[in-house]
Structure formats: C-alpha cells, structure tokens
Image (cartoon, rainbow, N blue to C red):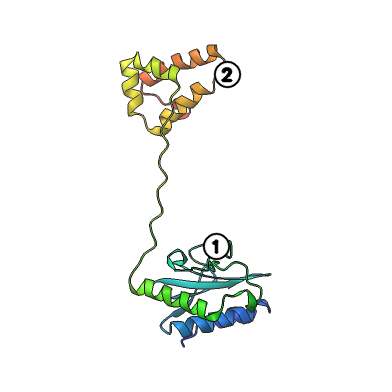
Amino acid sequence: MKKDKRIDAYLQNAQPFAQPILKHLRMLIHKANPGVEETIKWGMPSFDYKGPYCSFASFKQHAVFGFWKSKLIEDPKGYLGERANQGGEAMGNMGRLTSLKDLPPDKVIIDFIKQAKKLNDDGVKLPAKAKKAKKDVVVPDELLKALKRDKKALQNFEAFSPSQKNEYAQWVAEAKTDITREKRILTALEWISEEKGRNWKYQR
C-alpha cells in the first residue's frame, strides 16, 4: 500500500468522529484496488486509478465519500445518491457520514470500488452533459408585421445575432401603452434599417 503523507496528515487533523470513517474507507479502497494512487485534489484526499477515481473529505460535523463515475455504478439498493438523497460525480454520493454506522456494508463498498475500477480499466467515460437548447427569439406580432413591410429592415434584422434580436423584441414587448409600442416600433425600424443594435448609443 503506497500512502501519501499528506493524507496521513489530513486524517490526523480531521474531526475525531471522522477519523475512523476515513481510515476505514482508505483501507477498503486499497483492499479492493491495490493499484490506486493517493493524492490531494481540491484540498481533499483523492484516489486515482487510470484517471479520477474516488475521494473523501471531512468537515466540522460530517464526512463524505464518493466516486467520480458514481452515475455509472450499478447500485440496486440506492446507496449512491438516491438513498443518501445526495448526488455528485466526484464526491459526496453517500450523504452525510457521522459514524461508521452511516456507511453501507463493507461488501457493498468493495463492490462499488471494483465497479469503478472496471469502468476505468475499460476506459468508460461519463456521458457528456446535454447542451441546453437555445430558446428561439419571440418577436412581438406588431414588430414582425412592421418588419415584413420593410424589406431592408427585415433583412438586417434576420442578420442580427439572437441577443440583438431579443433586445428589440423585449423593448417593444415591454411597452405599457399602444402609443409607446407604436413609437418604439417606428424607432426600431429606423435603427434596424441602419444596421444599428438596440443599444447602439451606448456602444463605442
């Protein structure tokens, strides 16, 4: 077992309640995967194995432990996230740990550690986070009709970025009276025809 002296010091400085929890987890990690490498990341004890693997930490009133690829680990009894009501990719998958009794059975933890090892052995990566779909700019009907009557303004408006379009759309939509709305539409058409953004006056 290759130990990192920084983790030894971390455990010594941890709260008394947390020391037996973290020492036990450290022992299980090395038992289930002798090939792990100890290190410190983000100020917390971490264990690498062919990439990010697992980590734990101690706070004033609780400790946490979790796996980098927790979402890919088979967990039929919900010890990771669901049961703890606390998710996460890097740590904290088992909720607030205040004593050894809060930990799942050793065989369960060892199984998780071995599953995480296999994921890294097989080069399995976490799924990429889905990009948020860009919201279409909602142009008020009155402004849209006015633009369609002015080919040059419509052409320039369509060439604007979504943010530029949105600035004009919101400006017209926020008008509290019909008169104000009509004035803003006329002004918008004038500026758009000149390829000016809504806030062109404040731009250098």
Please give the label number shown on residue 196: none
Label 2 neighbour load within 10 Å: few <14, some 14-19, many 20+ = few
x and y, in percent, of residue 108 in the image: 51, 77
Tag 1 secondary structure:
loop
Name the residue: 35% across, 13% down: 149
Residue located 54% across and 63% down the image: 81
Tag 2's secondary structure?
Answer: loop
Q: Please identify the quadrant where the C terminus is shown.
A: top left
Image quadrant assignment for residue 164: top left
Amino acid of disc 1: Glu
Which residue corresponds to the image point at 57% horizontal and 18% vertical from the top-left?
A: 176
Q: Is residue 161 above or below residue 61?
A: above
Mark nearest the camera among 2 and 1 is: 1
User: Is the residue marked by circle 1 packed among few (<14), some (14-19), or many (20+) residues within 10 Å?
Assistant: some
Q: Which residue is mark 1?
A: 82
- Residue 25 at x, y percent in the picture: 55, 79
Q: Position of residue 91 (x, y in %)?
A: 52, 67
**86 over 48 or under it: above or below:** above
Q: Position of residue 84 (x, y in %)?
A: 58, 65
Asked if residue 201 can be seen in this view, the reply is no
Which residue lies under the disc numbered 2? 176
Q: Disc 2 to disc 1, how far (Cα)?
A: 48 Å
- The amino acid sitting under disc 2 is Lys
Examine the rendering and report whether any part of residue 123 can be seen. yes
- Picture residue at 63% right of the left edge, 80% below the top: 19
* Chain-order first, disc 2 or disc 1: 1
